[in-house]
Amino acid sequence: MARLVLHLVLLAVPAFATGPEPASGWREVRLGRADRHMVVAANPVAAEVGLAVLREGGTATDAAIATVLALGVVEPQSAGIGGGGFLMSLNGRTGKVTSFDGRETAPRAMKPEHFLVDGAAPQGMLGFMRAVVGGQSVGAPGLVRMLALAHKKGGRLPWRRLVEPAARLAREGFVVSPRLTQVALMFSPFMAVSTAASVYLPGGAPPLPGSRLQNTALAEVLDAVAASPDALYEGPIAKELAAGVVAAGGLLSERDLRAYRAIERAPIVATYRGHRVFGMCPPSSGGIAVAQLLSVLERVPKQGPELARAHLFAEASGLAFADRDRYVGDPAFVRVPTGLLAPDYLAARAGLVRLDAARASFAPGRPAGLPRGEGPKGIAAEWPSTTHLNVADSEGNAVALTASIENAWGSMVLVRGVLLNNQLTDFAFSPDATPTRRHPNAVAPGKRPRSSMSPTIVVDARGAFVMAAGSAGGPRIIESVARALTGVLDEGLDPAAALDRPNLGDRNGPVEVERGEDLPPHLDALGEELAAGLAALGHTVKRAELASGTHLIVSRGGKLLGAADPRREGVAVGD
């Protein structure tokens, strides 16, 4: 019966309500400055939670943990303990950068044909939303175990101290922001027939901005997590989570939760303009794609005019996405080609770029270590309903952390106050790349779906902190992060100036150039100028609303400079 009601809602829902998590208008980009330490996060309340941890002597890792847990309460549509994420950590004393993988895993009972309907992949937005809403899209959440692993490696304050602020916000309530109301309204037709409505559509309507919202059930779960991170994965809470997902049509079991492990991984490393750029390795495609994009740009003549830079950026982006779509998947299941970042391979890829004209599209390359017979890309979708935060402390430590529950409000399955993810829709819906080979991002039991999350840390030749970056935005995260890096490292922009410009990129299709009613007139005009110039160079150009959530911290002249994406409600705070 519930599935029939959802089907009727899907047929009746207006098109505007089926888009990704939107921007919240455009605010003036404010440059934050600090001498000692800084937090940049997507919500002011959560950012202040992290800053308080730093003031108590906590490390960047401590502050990042407290901040992201608070974000899960005050920005529930984007992330939370029912989801996953990736964390990059710089040790200021040793110069070592470590990455932590908290990506969700598919239930053991899941089959490759899981998302097929009558033998075919879901089509269009409505088909995608049928796969999103309900238990069938829920994977074992990894955020809490990832944070616990990172805390073990780089934390100083007690774990309980880091969880308590989020529990307090859930118990006592927090002031609802305009953004939360906006996104709840946008997705209310779907949420109205889900268990999430009990908290996030009080009285059947979105909570009003300025009202107070409580989630006492979530507070109780966070209290248990404060006592032990394993509380989410073993015992009565895990039992209820699994039962709630099964009741909503999913496959998650207590065994899946108990078996989940976060993984410490070696990061992707690229050199760019004398810096070392550290990114996330598979199952995220972000580190490889950003590294490829930057490496191609470094191998073509540096251009001055903005149109020329935009053209080269689009070409490098198209090349990176051609390889990303073809080759990247969970390394426990897929042999990702070893040569994707080899200097000779990248030089050959850069040789495909023309300075004076665009290519219609790029084919994937043939790097060393290529699995035989690999096929074309499959169908998978990622929506920009994610959050990112950066932290830098007074000891030279830094963290870049991206977390997500995937679509806005995740699967909309709420159990014990916990919103559960729909990350399994990041798998290719069609499991077969060719009649004889599976797609590298095909569904498999225990597998982690491919991601575009791109938490990034940049250091200088001595290993000292230079920059932390990351974004929300689905696959456009890669372009947003790379564009911010080039703005700071190539053009010498401060973080605010690097974000105060229209988004653009090429995912090996049309070049997308940002437009929107909320974009300031001078930036909309710049976007129109760039679109016309790119079209004259032979690009197929699309003006579109390109929501992002890019946050930056840069160390420059002994100061920390930070900025939050003007399209959302984030801030940079520090001492």
Image (cartoon, helix red, strand yellow):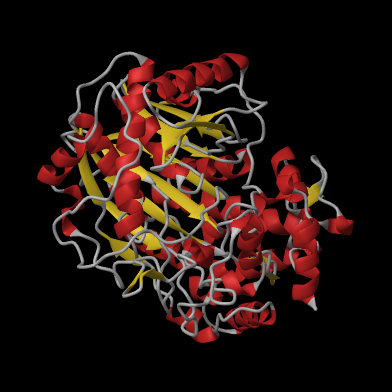
Considering depth in this image, is 259 or 221 the residue closer to the camera?
259
Residue at x 62% of width, y 15% of height: 521
x and y, in percent, of residue 125 in the image: 63, 55
Q: Is residue 453 visible?
A: yes
Residue at x 61% of width, y 24% of height: 519
In the displayed structure, would residue 316 be above or below residue 227? Answer: above
Residue at x 38% of width, y 59% of height: 377
x and y, in percent, of residue 44 in the image: 61, 38
Considering depth in this image, is 94 or 274 the residue closer to the camera?
274
In the displayed structure, would residue 532 be above or below residue 411? Answer: above
Give the tally of numbered discs: 0
Residue 457 shown left or right of residue 164 in the figure: left
Residue 120 shown left or right of residue 177 in the figure: left
x and y, in percent, of residue 395 in the image: 32, 39
Quadrant of the rendering where the N terminus is positioned: bottom right
x and y, in percent, of residue 283 in the image: 35, 61
Q: Is residue 575 visible?
A: no
The residue at the far right in this view is 203
Residue at x 15% of width, y 61% of height: 369
Residue 453 shown left or right of residue 72 in the figure: left
In the displayed structure, would residue 211 be above or below residue 302? Answer: below
Considering depth in this image, is 62 or 467 the residue closer to the camera?
467
In the rendered image, which quarter is residue 304 located in? top left
